[in-house]
């Protein structure tokens, strides 16, 4: 079985007491069949540091972008364009809108989101979208900026079935994290049942929000396995089939050569 963690912050894990280094994290993941990761950046200096930390590996690709919660300072859009064009970068982001934590930076978040989509279209790299308390504006900007040209994924999905439908209509993929396993996530499970298998991705968003039964512990890519097992039950398929489908979807969306997504 081959699973992909389609969204993790490898630079945010605990390398003091929990893990020795990135090799250690990836070995623990591989032991549970999670054999490939997309390491997601949240600032431009963070992107550079992440590349340094992870190095060149056959089983890790990167995104480049500035998170909506990191819009308190301006950044150089030209620099974003340059870094995003680098080899090994398969996506823009994470970008999007978060009005829950930082409503005061709304205008800057929107401008930044638009820039990520524009650059994504130029470079033919899909966008990784984060949204919280900003459903209408997120959908409107995706539409206005013609995101269908580069495609994208709504990561760590916490919206409802209707929003999922609108995203699917735009050709979007939808990624589920450990939140889908939480007791009070019934609306989310309803959406998950509705989304076709060929548009689903799984992720950890580690180090945040570990899935059941690891709640309270630090999340890590290995726990993609728990999300996948849970999603398989929801979708009424075997975990092997869910793994195969989501890995194929990952390859298609992020233009990652399928030969990199097979067990040796
Ligand atoms: Zn996010
Ligand atoms: Zn994230």
Image (spheres, grey):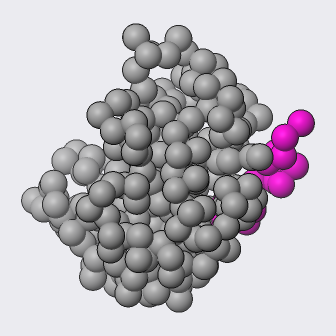
Residue 13 seen anywhere in this rendered image of the structure: yes
Q: Quadrant of the C terminus?
A: top right
Question: Residue 111: which quarter of the image?
Answer: bottom left
208 drawn magenta? no
Q: Is residue 44 above or below residue 246?
A: above
251 drawn magenta? yes
Main secondary structure found in the magenta portion? helix
Horizontal placement of 92 versus 27: left or right? Answer: left
User: How many numbered circles are shown?
Assistant: 0
Residue 60 seen anywhere in this rendered image of the structure: no
Q: Is residue 143 above or below residue 3?
A: below
Residue toward you, 38 or 51: 38
Can you give x and y, in whole percent of width and height, for residue 61 in the image? 65, 42
Horizontal placement of 120 versus 132: left or right? Answer: right
Residue toward you, 174 or 238: 238
Can you give x and y, in whole percent of width and height, for residue 21 in the image? 55, 15
Can you give x and y, in whole percent of width and height, for residue 85 in the image? 62, 50
Can you give x and y, in whole percent of width and height, for residue 8 in the image? 49, 42
Residue at position x 41%, y 40% in the image: 213
Residue at position x 62%, y 41% in the image: 37
Q: Residue furthest left?
A: 104
Q: Which residues are magenta?
A: 248-264
Residue at position x 48%, y 72% in the image: 192
Residue at position x 60%, y 18% in the image: 24
């Amino acid at each position: 079985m081959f699973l992909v963690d389609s969204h993790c912050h490898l630079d945010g894990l605990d390398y003091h007491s929990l893990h020795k280094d990135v090799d250690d994290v990836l070995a623990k993941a591989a032991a549970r069949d999670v054999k490939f990761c997309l390491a997601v950046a949240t600032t431009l200096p963070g992107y550079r540091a992440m590349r340094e930390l992870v190095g060149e590996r056959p089983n890790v690709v990167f995104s480049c972008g500035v998170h909506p919660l990191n819009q308190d300072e301006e950044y150089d859009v030209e620099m974003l364009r340059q870094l995003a064009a680098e080899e090994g970068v398969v996506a823009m982001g994470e970008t999007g809108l978060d009005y829950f934590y930082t409503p005061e930076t709304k205008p800057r978040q929107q401008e930044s989101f638009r820039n990520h989509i524009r650059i994504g279209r130029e470079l033919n790299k899909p966008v990784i979208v984060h949204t919280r308390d900003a459903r209408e504006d997120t959908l409107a900007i995706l539409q206005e900026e013609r995101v269908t040209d580069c495609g994208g994924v709504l990561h760590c999905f916490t919206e409802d079935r209707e929003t999922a439908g609108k995203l699917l209509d735009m050709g979007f993929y939808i990624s589920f994290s450990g939140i889908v396993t939480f007791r009070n996530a019934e609306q989310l499970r309803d959406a998950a049942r509705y989304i076709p298998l060929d548009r689903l991705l799984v992720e950890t968003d580690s180090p945040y929000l570990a899935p059941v039964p690891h709640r309270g512990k630090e999340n890590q890519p290995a726990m993609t396995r728990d999300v996948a097992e849970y999603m398989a039950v929801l979708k009424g398929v075997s975990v092997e089939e869910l793994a195969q489908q989501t890995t194929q979807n990952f390859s298609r969306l992020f233009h990652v050569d399928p030969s990199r997504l097979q067990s040796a």
